[in-house]
Image (tube, helix red, strand yellow):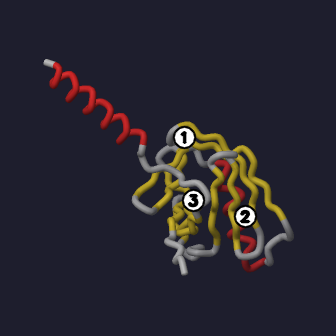
């Protein structure tokens, strides 16, 4: 009887620990831009033209392009995420890169939840995918 109770309690503890370790947005990790979706059309020309870094303790993030960065604040509850501040900082991007910055500024406020698929961080609104970032291994030398 005691062994059965111990086994049941250890099983419950293991399940709780496993469910608490679901993949989520990692703190201070670079996620590189893979694609954006505008009018349900995937644009992969933006690949590696920007990246985002989250500070999960302060609920802030910075989205960097090659010429500028966008300061973000967000709130998160499980898989739900809402960007409340999306503000470009610094000098505006030149025309050739302005489209990427404008896409980021217009898409980020529309995001309502995210999911992690392996190394991919997928931002969505309802059932539509809006942006995909991927975690890139940083080589340590």
Instruction: Tell me the number on the disc at residue 12.
Output: none
Instruction: Tell me the number on the disc at residue 80.
Output: 1
Please state the horizontal and vertical placement of residue 93, each as a whole percent of the image: 79, 73
Q: Residue at x 72, y 66 (%)?
A: 101
Q: Can you name the residue that lies furthest to the right here?
A: 91
Please state the horizontal and vertical placement of residue 87, each as a whole percent of the image: 79, 55
From the viewer's side, name the closer residue of 73 and 7: 7
Q: Looking at the picture, does residue 37 appear above or below residue 96?
A: above
CA–CA distance between discs 1 and 2? 23 Å
Please state the horizontal and vertical placement of residue 12, each as a whole percent of the image: 29, 30
Q: Residue at x 75, y 56 (%)?
A: 71
Residue under label 2: 102
Badge 1: few (under 14), some or many (20 or more) residues near its Cα, within 10 Å?
Answer: some
Q: Quadrant of the C terminus?
A: bottom right
From the viewer's side, name the closer residue of 5 and 27: 5
98 with respect to 39 (left or right)? right
Secondary structure found at label 3 = loop
Q: Is there a contact, CB below 8 Å, between mark 1 and mark 2?
A: no
Residue under label 3: 39
Pair 2/3: label in front:
2
Which circle's residue, 3 or 1, is located before the other in the chain?
3
Pair 1/2: label in front:
1
95 with respect to 18 (left or right)? right
Q: Is there a contact, CB below 8 Å, between mark 2 and mark 3?
A: no
Q: Residue at x 17, y 20 (%)?
A: 2
Please state the horizontal and vertical placement of residue 118, each as a whole percent of the image: 40, 60
């Amino acid at each position: 009887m005691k062994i059965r109770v111990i086994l049941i309690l250890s099983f419950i503890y293991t399940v709780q620990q496993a469910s608490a370790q679901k993949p989520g947005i990692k703190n201070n990790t670079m996620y590189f831009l893979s694609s954006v979706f505008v009018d349900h059309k995937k644009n992969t020309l933006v690949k590696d033209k920007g990246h985002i870094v989250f500070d999960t303790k302060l609920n802030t993030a910075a989205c960097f392009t090659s010429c500028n960065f966008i300061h973000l604040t967000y709130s998160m509850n499980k898989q739900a995420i809402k960007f409340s501040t999306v503000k470009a900082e610094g000098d505006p991007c030149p025309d050739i890169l302005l489209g990427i910055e404008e896409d980021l500024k217009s898409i980020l406020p529309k995001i309502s939840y995210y999911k992690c698929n392996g190394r991919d961080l997928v931002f969505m609104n309802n059932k539509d995918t809006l942006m995909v970032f991927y975690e890139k291994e940083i080589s340590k030398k």
